[in-house]
Image (cartoon, rainbow, N blue to C red):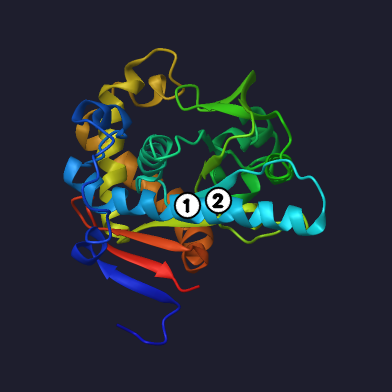
Amino acid sequence: MNLYSPYIEFNRKEWAELKEHQTTLPLTEAELEQLKGLNEEVSIQEVEDIYLPLTHFIDLYARVSRELNQLTASFLKKEQSPAPYIIGIGGSVAVGKSTTARLLQAMLARGKNKPKVDLVTTDGFLYPNAMLEEKGIMNRKGFPESYDIKSLIQFMGDVKSGKPEVKAPVYSHLAYDVIQGEEQTICQPDILIIEGINVLQVKKETPLLVSDFFDFSIYIDAEEEHIRHWYIERFKLLRSTAFQNTDSFFHDRFANIGEEEAVQTASQIWKDINAKNLHENILPTKGRARLILRKEADHSIQHIKLRKL
């Protein structure tokens, strides 16, 4: 171990030993299947070894944070609205952020005190396709400039200040666009998970960063070649599933292409868009995360880095 690293490092065995003894696993195999993303391999053993210690650790942090907020309010003799403990989850396209977010939401909500846990993805804060077309950046969807960062910052500020009801826009992966008129309402959760490729980015359009509102942050990491492979495999699966839906944005483009063309198309999209975004905007934020989960080729998490306090 590098003594001068800002992180404490764990292998899978060391991390798994941190779980509390005689703890009942809060998920069944059937529930796990419902939470897994397309082309995601997550076993019950993975949940037990990685996510059970992680949820116990986050629950500990969240409880201490609530106690500190109460002590602060008491010292200042000021009443404060309860603020949620906010967790940010970042990483590349196709690395498994959504699965991690859903697993944490389900497991944290079944913790000892049954906290209310909400999940919001930053996809909803993408500019609508019509605006991206108008700006000439449709081919840079997912890059920092394709997000309405000011609205996302406003949302984060309202939630963190304890506002009773805050609304977030909703994104449809089928339509590949923000759904006009549809919103997700957030009502003072105990824990809020924010998932998205842009959550740890530092390019400023406002005086604040999205990550300024996080109490805890996680980066999902893997070798680029593994992520590229997962992206291509997912594209192939979508070609025979979601893209077959006539309402899909990609139906006319990709539903009827052969497997070889699908691999070529996905490889080109990865090279022209996702790899550039990874290197320019996403990967540089890894060191800002409190926790880094490192995946291997089989999707299993084998290495964990926790930033020192």
Left or right: where 58 falls relative to 229: right
Disc 1 on helix, strand or loop? Answer: strand
The amino acid on which the numbered mark 2 sits, given as a three-letter code, is Asn
Query: How many other residues sit within 10 Å of disc 1, few (<14), some (14-19) or many (≥20)?
Result: many
The answer to the question of whether label 2 and label 1 lie on touching residues, with beta carbons closer than 8 A, is yes
Q: Nearer the viewer, residue 100 or 215?
A: 215
Which mark, by number, is residue 184?
none
Find the distance from the CA under tag 2 to the CA under tag 1.
7 Å
Tell me which residue sits at (52%, 49%) in the image.
87
Mark 2 highlights which residue?
198
Mark on residue 90?
1
Q: Residue at x 40, y 12 (%)?
A: 246
Amino acid type, mark 1: Gly
What x and y, as percent, mark residue 190?
Answer: 56, 39
Quadrant of residue 206 within the rendered picture:
bottom right
Disc 2 vs disc 1: which is toward the camera?
1
Closest to the observer: 213 or 198?
A: 213
Residue at far bottom of view: 3
Q: Residue at x 23, y 42 (%)?
A: 42
Q: Using the image as rendered, state which of residue 307 and residue 247 is in the foreground.
A: 307
Q: Position of residue 265 (x, y in %)?
A: 33, 39
User: Can you say whether 217 is above or below 146 in the image?
Assistant: below
Label 2 neighbour load within 10 Å: few <14, some 14-19, many 20+? many
Residue 304, horizontal then vertical, whole percent: 32, 64
- Total numbered circles: 2
User: In which image quadrant can residue 114 be found?
Assistant: top left
